[in-house]
Amino acid sequence: ILAKILESGCRALERLAVDENNIYTIMKEGGVKTLCSILKANLENDKVAISALSALTAMATRKENCVYIAKCGAVEAAVALLKAHPDNARVARHVLEFIQAMAKDEQSINQVVQGGGIESVVGILKTFPEDVEIQSLGIKVLGMLGISETNIDRIANAGGYPVVVASM
């Protein structure tokens, strides 16, 4: 029963995050910290975790939001969710969507990279080579993360180049 309540609450926050005023109110009331806590505490329950991650994705609408979401530990929690469900395409898609939403500017991209974003995206691409939607989104996200020489080197070290070439 608790899982259903958590899932419903996360979905409600996602639906309420329709504009910056609502997002600001949710953040001010501790919504991001709560969602991060729910995500971290429910990694084994993909439905609850995906609902929390989707709500965080909905709030990643601008640079300042992304920086705050990352500071609350959402990137590391998303990476942990992926590790808990490495073969779950639904989890993979939601993690990619989250990383894409978080990649707003250099600061938020660096937070994503420091949290393991590049390795996660490359891992997703390796795990789902036949899933066209995942490959397309993953390659796009990987390109977004490659904003600096350091990040490009990290993509190369994670095995990103052969994965991108193989997907074409």
Image: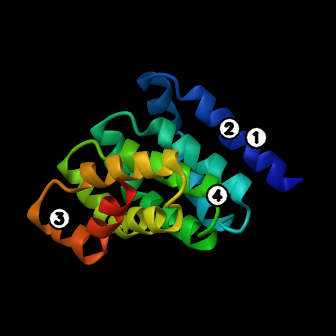
Q: CA distance from mark 1 to mark 4?
A: 12 Å
For label 3, count other residues whose C-alpha is less than 10 Å away and answer few (under 14), some (14-19) or many (20+).
Answer: some
Q: Is residue 103 visible?
A: yes
Q: Which residue is mark 4?
A: 38
- When asked about the image quadrant of residue 123, the answer is bottom left
Tell me if mark 2 has few (under 14), some (14-19) or many (20+) residues whose alpha carbon lies within 10 angstroms of its own: some
User: What x and y, as percent, mark residue 44?
Assistant: 71, 68
Q: Nearer the viewer, mark 4 or mark 3?
A: 3
- For disc 1, the marked residue is 8
Q: Residue at x 36, y 49 (%)?
A: 68
Q: Nearer the viewer, residue 143 or 103?
A: 143
Q: Position of residue 1 (x, y in %)?
A: 90, 53
Nearer-N-terminus badge (1/3): 1
Residue at image position (38%, 45%) is: 100
Q: Residue at position x 30%, y 47% from top?
A: 103
Separation of marks 1 and 3 at Cα, in angstroms:
39 Å
Pointers 1 and 4 in contact (CB under 8 A)?
no
| Location of residue 63 with respect to 83 vertically, above or below | above
**Amino acid on which the number 3 mark rests in the picture:** Ile
Q: Work out whether mark 4 precedes mark 2 in sequence or the reverse, and give the earlier one.
A: 2
The residue under label 3 is: 152
Viewer-nearest of discs 4 and 2: 2
Rendering coords of residue 40 (x, y %): 59, 65
User: Farthest residue toward the right?
Assistant: 1
Residue 104 versus residue 119 in the image, above or below: above
Q: Secondary structure at mark 4?
A: helix
Residue type of the residue flagged with mark 4: Ile
* Element carrying mark 3: helix
Q: Which residue is mark 2?
A: 11
In the structure shown, which secondary structural element does the residue marked by tag 2 occupy? helix
Number of marks drawn:
4
